Structures are given as structure tokens and as C-alpha cells.
Amino acid sequence: MDRVTGVVVGAGVVGLAVARALQINLGGDWLILEQENAIGTQTSSRNSEVIHAGIYYPKGSLKAQLCVQGKKMLYTYLQERGLPFKRCGKLIVATHDEQLNQLLAIQKKAADNGVNDLVLLDAQQACELEPQLFCKAALVSPSTGIVDSHALMLSYQGDFENAGGVVVFYASVNRVLPTDHGFELTMQDNTWIASQYLINATGLSAPLLAQLIEGYASSFAPTPYYAKGNYFTLSRKSPFQHLIYPVPEAAGLGVHLTLDLGNQAKFGPDVQWVDDPHDLEVDLSRGDAFYAEVRKYWPTLPDGALEPGYAGIRPKISGPKDASADFLIQGPQTHGVAGLVHLFGIESPGLTSSLAIGDAVLQLLND
């Protein structure tokens, strides 16, 4: 049986950031256990790669606090490491008069969260920035950006391994038994690992992994829900230089236009509730709805310009009829199992918040 200081299960962007923080600050021997053959193959590689400003989230929520803190940490980290990113900014657009008050409410919510750089533009000012845009008014968020998420994850992995950590692939956990000295993990190949600390950063599977831990009360584990997001890509050069977001929907941020670092445009994600977290095929039947939504703010989008891109699943812990749940970082103070931390419902803005989430887990273990 291998004995280590701690185990982080899941090598997505959040698991990597958490493991990095713990290995660097606590020392010892840490493992990341990843069931796939590479880092970041699920939610972390199937998103918009946006560095969020911290605009939309309820005041005092973990999403608001960790996004604003994480954004500052992330920009500093990217600059120090010379990693690819762009602070391109975004426009949040009202496309009819009834949404104007919503823009003002968004601006106030952002200010409540400490984001005070939003600027309200009228239609003419917005179109001076983006001539192809149609809107009644828009908010400019200058601190929103884009990042190469894979380069970021590779950097987190490098920091973790350089500090002494080890990433293990094809490593599926079948059973977890708390002991007097931590945990015994039984792997799919029947090998055992003994660990003082255990961090559940498995994203979509986090509530299911929690159920495998003997002595952990199942009532503490939230119900998982899966909100699929389809993306369609633009088959020609983008006329936009900023990200374009409509006024947000209940479960997501609407069918928005985002750019990658090569200025290739994509649209999405929409919100499609599914039962299977492995349902990652783009639903082609939703293409017509994409054209309709995008043409609300880009009326001259040509027919045939959208191609199926990819799909991702949001690891939600609130259902389609519920208000969107906050991040749930659940430590021993809640469930009573020493050395155990669960990361539930870490959807957007998880990438932006990743370094701050790492510090939050470190603080929980230190407490």
C-alpha cells in the first residue's frame, strides 16, 4: 500500500489548482488521481475559456468572492508565467427596451461585488466599438478576457510536479474508507492508497464520489444535475473584437459570442438539461435557435455561417426549476470527516476562480 500526505481526485483546472496550492504550501507527498489519460479532458476543455470579471453573482456568494479574487490572481499568474491570454473586454447588450433596466441592475450587482469598471454605452457608442452590433444599450466590461485553458492547466501541473507532486492517470477510485490516520482508497485495479487528506475535485462526478466514502452522511451530498451547453463555430472571419453577451438567462449567460486567441469566433453555450453527463455530441437540431438568438445582436449573420463545434456539461447542483446554486466547498467543519474536502457545483466561473479556490481549500485544511 502506498502512503501519501494527500490525494486530489480529478485533474481538471480546479483540481490542478487545488493540488498545486496544497503541495506548495503544505509540502509532503501529494497525488492527483485522474481516471482519464490526460489532464482537463472533460469540463475544463469544453468551455468558453473566458476570464470572468465577477459581474453576475449574488453579493457575498462564493462565486462572487472567488471570481473577483481569482481574476486578479489569474491575470498576475498569466503575466508572470508568460502564458497566452488577452484582456479583450466584453459587451453585455440589451437588444430591446425592456432590457435596459436589467443592464442597470447588472451594473449595480457588479459594483456590489467590487467590480466598478463597467461603463454604460448607448446604442451609438456601442456600435462605434463594434459596427456590426445591434443593441439599444450595452455595458462594457474591460477586465473580462480570454485564456488558453490548456496552457494554463499544463502550467498548474508543472508547478505541482516541480514541488514534488505526482499525477496518476487511468486512476479510478472504487471505495474510500476513513481511518484513524486519514483514508484508505481502493482503486479500480484493487491497489490501495493510504492518505491523510482527500480532496474531491471530480466536477461532474463529485456527488457520486462522495457517496463512495464510508462514514460520510449521504445527506450532505447534493443531487447532481447536468446542463449541457452546445457550441457552434463561425465558419469565417469574425467582425468582432470584443466578447458579446446578451442579458443573461436563468441557467446560463445566453448564447454569447466569444473569441479564442486566434480571433476565431464561437457561439454558445445554450442550456440543454440532460440525464447523461457523457452526452457530449452537439445537438444539430438546436442550430436554428442559435441563428435566431445571435441575430438579435448580429442581424447580418449570414445563412450557413455556423458549424457544429463542441459541447460541454455544467456540473450543477441545482435543477432546471431552481435558482442557480452557489459553489459548495464542503469541509470537515460541515460533515465532520477530518481531512476531507468536497468541491461541489464548481461550474463557471470555476476556471477564473481556480487559484482562489486553491487558497480556499488550503485555508479549510489549515483551520
Image (cartoon, rainbow, N blue to C red):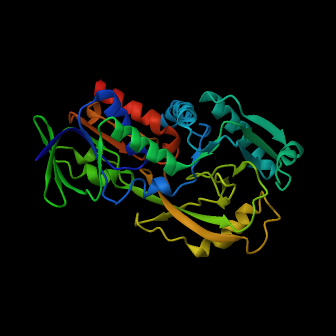
Q: Is residue 335 left or right of residue 131?
A: left
Residue nearest the viewer, comparing 325 with 360 = 360
Number of callouts: 0
Residue nearest the viewer, comparing 281 with 112 = 281
Q: In this view, does 107 lie to the left or right of 152?
A: right
Q: Which residue lies furthest to the top in this view?
A: 367
Residue nearest the viewer, comparing 83 with 21 = 83
Residue 90, given in percent of the width and then of the height, sits at: 71, 44
Q: Can residue 201 be seen in this view?
A: yes
Q: Is residue 323 visible?
A: no
Q: Quadrant of the C terminus?
A: top left
In this rendering, is residue 208 above or below 8? below
Residue 289, given in percent of the width and then of the height, sits at: 67, 69
Residue nearest the viewer, comparing 199 with 45 = 45
Displayed quadrant of residue 20: top left
Residue 239, given in percent of the width and then of the height, sits at: 79, 57
Q: Residue at x 27, y 30 (%)?
A: 27
Residue 123, given in percent of the width and then of the height, sits at: 86, 46
Displayed quadrant of residue 126: top right
Q: Residue at x 31, y 34 (%)?
A: 23
Q: Is residue 117 left or right of residue 344?
A: right
In this rendering, is residue 90 above or below 306? above
Q: Which residue lies furthest to the right in this view?
A: 124
